Image (cartoon, rainbow, N blue to C red):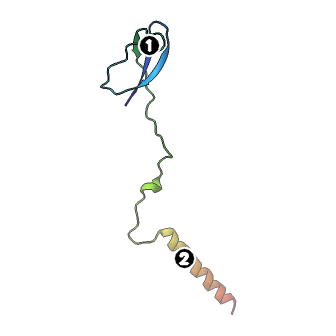
Amino acid sequence: MPTYTYRCKQCGMEFDHFQSIADPPLQTCPSCNGPLERVITGGAGLIFKGSGFYITDYARKNSSGGSKNSEKSSTTEKKGSATNNNSSK
């Protein structure tokens, strides 16, 4: 639902009002009961509210069950342990 900006023709007060598109426009000023006009504005644009969206939120799961990083680290560990065993002999 959009937020509309209204301006009083009598006292000049401006205020924003959150209402449905189907609702009729406001007619009287809440401050002085004067006539209102709806102000045409550029709008606020697109606003995202919340903690945000991250690529990891919708990441695809690998069907192989492991990632490339875990395979590399396990290969490195095997090489490192083989080197340590040879140097101790």
* Residue picked out by circle 2: 74
The label shown at residue 29 is 1
Taking depth in this image into account, of 50 and 29 the one nearest to the observer is 29
Residue 45, given in percent of the width and then of the height, sits at: 44, 31
Estimate how packed mark 1 is, as few (under 14), some (14 to 19) or many (20 or more) residues with alpha carbons within 10 Å.
many
**Residue at x 51% of width, y 68% of height:** 69
Q: Are marks 2 and 1 in contact (CB under 8 Å)?
A: no
Rendered-image quadrant of the C terminus? bottom right
Under circle 2, the secondary element is helix
Residue 30, given in percent of the width and then of the height, sits at: 45, 15
Q: Is residue 37 above or below residue 72?
A: above
> Mark 2 is on which residue type?
Ser
| Residue furthest to the top | 10
Image-quadrant location for residue 59 = bottom left
Instruction: Please tell me whether mark 2 or mark 1 is closer to you in this view.
Output: 1
Taking depth in this image into account, of 55 and 19 the one nearest to the observer is 19
Under circle 1, the secondary element is loop
> Mark 1 is on which residue type?
Cys
Residue 61, given in percent of the width and then of the height, sits at: 40, 64
Image-quadrant location for residue 19 = top left
Q: Is residue 31 left or right of residue 87?
A: left
Estimate how packed mark 2 is, as few (under 14), some (14 to 19) or many (20 or more) residues with alpha carbons within 10 Å.
few
**Residue at x 38% of width, y 69% of height:** 63
**Residue at x 49% of width, y 10% of height:** 12
